[in-house]
Amino acid sequence: MLTMEEAMKQSAKSLVAQGQIVKGTVIEVRSKEVLVDIGYKSEGIIPGNEFIDLKAVKVGDEIDVLIEKLENKDGTVVLSHEKAEFKKNWDKILTICNEGGIISGKVKSIVKGGLVVNVGVEAFLPSSQIDVITPKNLAGFVGNTYEFKVVKINQERQNIVLSRRELIEAERNEKRGKLLTEMTPGDIRKGTVKNITDFGAFIDLNGLDGLLHITDMSWGRLTHPSEILKVGQELDVVVLDVNKEKERVSLGLKQKMTNPWDNIEAKFPVGQKVKGKVVSLVPYGAFVQLEPGVEGLVHVTELSWTKRIAKPGDVLKQDQEIEAVVLGINREEQKISLGVRQLESNPWDSAAAKYAVGQKVKGQVRNLTSYGAFVELEEGIDGMIHVSDMSWTRKINHPSEVMKKGDEVEATVLEVDRPNQRIALGIKQLEIDPWDNIEKLYKVGDLVTGKVTKLASFGAFVGLQHDIDGLVHISQISEERVEKIKNVLKAGQDVSARVVKIDKNERRIGLSIKAASYTDEQIKEEQKILDSLKPGEDLVALQHAFDAADDLVKGD
């Protein structure tokens, strides 16, 4: 005969079936599983991860379970609390929540592509639908309860797809519309830096994004918004403009402060000495901050009266504190011109008195150019000797013919040009022009000696005393016809010649080698021949003759 307990279990066995949902009583809670009695011949086991909070499950709790198997290989009933809840809630969810409906749920876990949310049954929340901006770290959402919009229900597969982003966007759209209606220029609003670009920053005004342009961030210079802002930073901004049609809001930060340029002329009058910090060095000058939002420019030409400064970085450093003088102000363009050299007296103001015209000076050759030589008279003040002022008698093609860099030279001051800061010097003016007294130095008929200095196709130049050159025309070299000068004369050769012509106005001396042994009568006859030659055939003016010498045909 069956006992009462055996009769009850046998009766229970006949009442339960696989796939059925029944009531069960928790008889033991283990670390990873829960033991449940459903009145069957053996207890059932439910995995602990099927419970939202395993610690909240207590012995004696009555729960719904789904019978998956009445008996496994160990003789144990296989139960599922999760599936029981799912089956029990599925129809309920379909009833209360169609696609587009709102439902509350708790984030259970992270899966590939998103999150699993418990809304009575497990639903899927894609990563792209978690927030307006897809979050990189999903762990922070696990365990939290949110409201979601049901975007898709698949009854055959019994799955639900949710979106939290759509609810957030809808809420933001509602807020945005309200903000656009309420907001007016001049309002001060709290916001959070949402994104930073090269041209500005987008500020989240709690549902509406506004643009804070870089030019409206500070009254002073700003290279990039990241210098004063960072993403996530909270700040108060001023509403500058609202475009309701395009839903655009322009914001300002500097407008919260008084414009420091409003009273700039009174604060920094022209001529006043000021102090500031070098905030930027550029090829053409240095920007100096006089106060927050106010900068002045020291142009590279205003750094020194005398030193040749190629770039401001040669004499100034970033963040250096300097003194300067205000040279000019343009409030409309927010520009201040500063000068550093004005702190000292300009040495050119006294240059005319210090270097009087006619005064002899000494200096070192600092530089040579094609047209002259620059001589340093004192630090920063140079005089220039033009090639035409290097010799009374010779044509100097390049200053290197008579001097080199580093030479100590003496010269005469010819002119002082204060406005253009130039001093003209001359070397030849140290001596008397020999052509002024040429009649005392040379006379027609004089027998002279010298060295051949240059050869040209039309004749040869002979260096005489007093640094004067004479020209021997090709017809005056020999009694015999000379086809090529180089066949009878060479540079450096000593020759004797007779002075046959002197033209003081044209600064010409004509020589004749063949007449060296002539009598006075013969010399007079030779001179008549020279006088009868057409212009250009006889003694070429020295300044032109030297040019012609360089054109000597080397192949001849």
Image: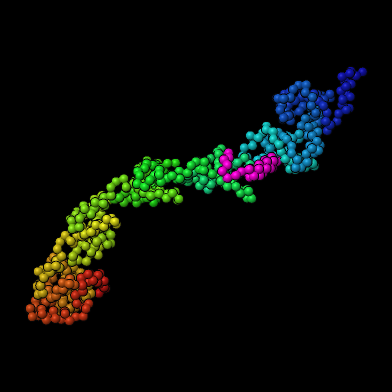
Between residues 72 and 149, which one lies in front from this camera angle? Answer: 149
Residue 555 relative to residue 106: left or right: left
Between residues 369 and 481, which one lies in front from this camera angle? Answer: 369
Q: Can residue 220 be seen in this view?
A: no
Magenta stretch: helix, strand or loop mostly: helix
Q: What stretch is highlighted in magenta?
A: 162-191
Please tell me which residue is depicted at 34% across the width and 48% down the height of the picture: 303
Name the outermost residue toward the right: 1
**Colour setting:** rainbow
* Place of residue 291 in the rendered image (x, y in percent of width and height, measured from the top left): 42, 41
> Which quadrant holds residue 159?
top right
Please tell me which residue is depicted at 81% across the width and 31% down the height of the picture: 66
> In the picture shown, does residue 184 fall above or below 109?
below
* Place of residue 346 in the rendered image (x, y in percent of width and height, measured from the top left): 28, 49
Between residues 184 and 23, which one lies in front from this camera angle? Answer: 184
Q: Does the magenta stretch include residue 201?
A: no
Q: Is residue 169 magenta?
A: yes
Q: Is residue 370 visible?
A: yes
Please tell me which residue is depicted at 76% across the width and 32% down the height of the picture: 82
* Place of residue 226 in the rendered image (x, y in percent of width and height, measured from the top left): 51, 42
> In the picture shown, does residue 479 fall above or below 77?
below
Residue 204 relative to residue 63: left or right: left
> In the picture shown, does residue 88 fall above or below 221?
above
* Place of residue 446 in the rendered image (x, y in percent of width and height, measured from the top left): 9, 73
Residue 432 relative to residue 108: left or right: left
